[in-house]
Amino acid sequence: MLKIGIIGTGGIARTHIDGYRRFPAECEVVALCDIAPGRADAVRAELGLPAARTYERAEDLLAAEDLDLVSIATPPSTHAELTITALRAGVDVLVEKPMAPSLEECDAMLAAAAENDRILSVVAQNRFRDDLATLKEVLDSGLIGPVSHAQVSSAWWRGTAYYDLWWRGTWESEGGGCTLNHAIHHLDLTSWMLGAPSAVTAVLTNAAHENSEVEDLSVAVLQYDRALAEVTSSVVHHGEEQAIVVQGRHARVSQPWQVVADVAEPNGFPAPGGDPGRVAAIEALAAAHTPLAHEGHAGQIGDVLGAVRERRRPAVDGTAGRRAIELVTAVYVAGIERRTVDLPLSADDPYYRAGTLVQRAPRFFEKTTAVADLPGEITVGASSAGDD
């Protein structure tokens, strides 16, 4: 029975706890930690974890408990320090997205995992969704041909009060805006499905949240060998209608699910009816997808539990988490510096280092409200890929 600790007991911690509870024969949540006095006790009572011990300092939890795995569900600016502390204490780590605000911190986390022979996984729960796993399988099959274009819409909506929470809405404590903290899901999926781009260009703005320093909208173009991908990152889109549309030479496939395959008339214009055989082949491949036993956080937690038991690499390791941060960093550099950014970013790039973004990023507005907590639960639109 693996012993689990939870560091940070805000809204997303409940999702982690629910995920662990899907595997009662494999693990048990034995400890909760939160810096806010009484919060861990309140969550223990609310979720019915009477045997779990509570702490206000992660160091105390790690010293007192004999843990196999910790989930780190704290604000992004704390991820690196807490992860490294846990890894050095000999505990495997599942850390919430985003991995960390800078590549320098990501590399320090990876080094700590390697030096202490520990497992590090970064939350990317949308890889564990049947619809997106199906899309990945179709792309990997080659049936759509070489990819020419992708449209990735990370469309979220948040009211102004969202940024009243103390750690949101500043470059220093949140690490960034919607590009880092919301579109990280879709940027990870883009990297997972299409691979790493060679260059990025982007623009940033704050269109609707006057109580936040950070961007609430960015539009990026990722350049591949012979393809382009557009990524919109937003918390200003009513309805949160998210989509991934991939155009190949032979067909288009997307989630929400749609398949189209055009063929040409002798004059180059599309022929009526397209290519029904290719559409049928793609649909058959999609229909053959084996449903996942668990989706979302529970799916990833199940994989991480297996990795801890078997001492193998998890499906989403620290290197995958770093790749998503590199894309986010490139979007920020391109938007702030108003130039095209080549990838990969080198360790001597100023934006590789922790603190450069805080120094150079624009303050779109001044954050004027900072409350300890917000009422209500996390809610997302019906088509949303993720949560925050």
Image (cartoon, rainbow, N blue to C red):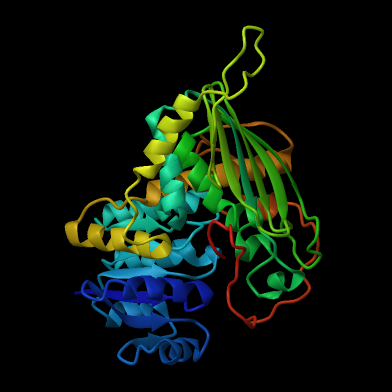
Q: Residue furthest top?
A: 266
Identify the residue at horizontal 44%, vertical 85% (top origin): 56
Number of numbered discs present?
0
* Residue 133 at x, y percent in the picture: 41, 47
Please tell me in which quadrant of the rendered image residue 92 appears.
bottom left
* Residue 299 at x, y percent in the picture: 36, 60
Please tell me in which quadrant of the rendered image residue 224 appears.
top right
- Pick the residue in front: 278 or 328: 278
Identify the residue at horizontal 62%, vertical 12% (top origin): 265
- Pick the residue in front: 88 or 144: 144
Please, is residue 282 above or below residue 358 in the view?
above
Please, is residue 245 above or below residue 374 in the view?
above
Residue 127 in view in this figure: yes
- Residue 239 shown left or right of residue 378 in the figure: right
* Residue 81 at x, y percent in the picture: 45, 65
In the picture, the quarter occupied by the C terminus is bottom right
Please tell me in which quadrant of the rendered image residue 31 appears.
bottom left
Identify the residue at horizontal 65%, vertical 11% (top origin): 268
Identify the residue at horizontal 60%, vertical 40% (top origin): 330
- Residue 111 shown left or right of residue 235 in the figure: left
- Residue 177 shown left or right of residue 32 in the figure: right
- Pick the residue in front: 271 or 11: 271
Please, is residue 370 above or below residue 125 in the view?
below
Q: Residue furthest front?
A: 273
Residue 321 in view in this figure: no
In the picture, the quarter occupied by the N terminus is bottom left
- Residue 348 shown left or right of residue 52 in the figure: right
* Residue 182 at x, y percent in the picture: 59, 57
